[in-house]
Amino acid sequence: MCSYGPIKETEIVNAVDNYKLRKMSREASAKNAVCYDPAQFALGGIRDANVRSGDNVVVIGLGAIGQLAVQMAKKSGASIVIAVDPIEKRREIAGKYGADYCFDPTACDVGYEIKRITGKMGADAILETSGSVQALQSALKGLAYGGTIAYLAFAKPFPAGLWLGQEAHYNYGKIVFSRACSEPNPDYPRWNRKRIEDVVWDMLMSGYLDCSEIIDPVVKFEDSAEGICTYMDKEQEKSIKMGVTFGGEE
């Protein structure tokens, strides 16, 4: 079984809430199950950005949500997928998952590179998951005329530096604040949170999405507190989403 909950040995779940308790086959990937939550937000972002076959798509921020969005964009038929993150390991994994180009935003002008790669057209859709003010500015610069930015990040207040002048207005872009768990869904009543949950669960359990390199490292339960301190705070460059095993489980 798979469920939401804190990291502890025993969890009581209300089985009536389908999104809180899911049945897994023995053949299904436990690492894929751990990505049940980020996959929902990745799919919500893909839909809110209106990603279609042939589009040029950019994903900024390559945590679990961003990595899954890269896969979904490529599998949706995107012509070019560009992935952006300052952490080298995350860029390498995005490349394995289908990104055609990967950029370090600390080493280049990302907005310029998007325009260069797309023949000055820009990106039809940009998914921004990082919450960085520089990332949003790069998205505004790299967006195609009339394109859409799906803003998935739950950002803190921005410091000075966001310019909603020339780049934003000239590209005539749209910013959609994307949150898969908010109701009603923009495509309600056809789509709601439960449908998103059901769809991504099928994607994960069937192996359509691959989370084998997203869940890394995997630590034992008794080492989880130290692991969180290390991989989510001190050494973020070594991890995307940490997994925890209980007992003899792998």
Image (spheres, rainbow, N blue to C red):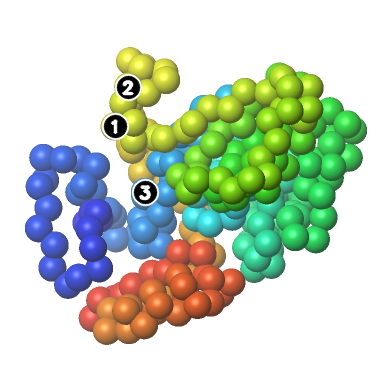
Q: Is residue 142 above or below residue 211?
A: above
Q: Which amino acid is tagged 3? A: Asp
Looking at the image, tell me whether mark 1 or mark 3 is earlier in sequence order: 3
In this view of the protein, can residue 120 be seen by the observer?
yes
Tell me if mark 1 has few (under 14), some (14-19) or many (20+) residues whose alpha carbon lies within 10 angstroms of its own: few
- Which residue does the image show at 13% across and 68% down from the upper left? 10
Q: Is residue 123 above or below residue 3?
A: above
- Which residue does the image show at 34% across and 31% down from the upper left? 182
User: Left of 205 or right of it: where is 136?
Assistant: right
Please tell me whether mark 3 or mark 2 is closer to you in this view: 2
The label shown at residue 12 is none
| Disc 3: which residue | 37
| Disc 1: which residue | 194
Q: Which amino acid is tagged 2? A: Pro
- Which residue does the image show at 32% across and 84% down from the upper left? 223
User: Left of 215 or right of it: where is 58?
Assistant: right
Q: Furthest residue to the top?
A: 189
Label 3, secondary structure: give it: helix
| Disc 2: which residue | 184
Q: Position of residue 218 (x, y in %)?
A: 41, 75
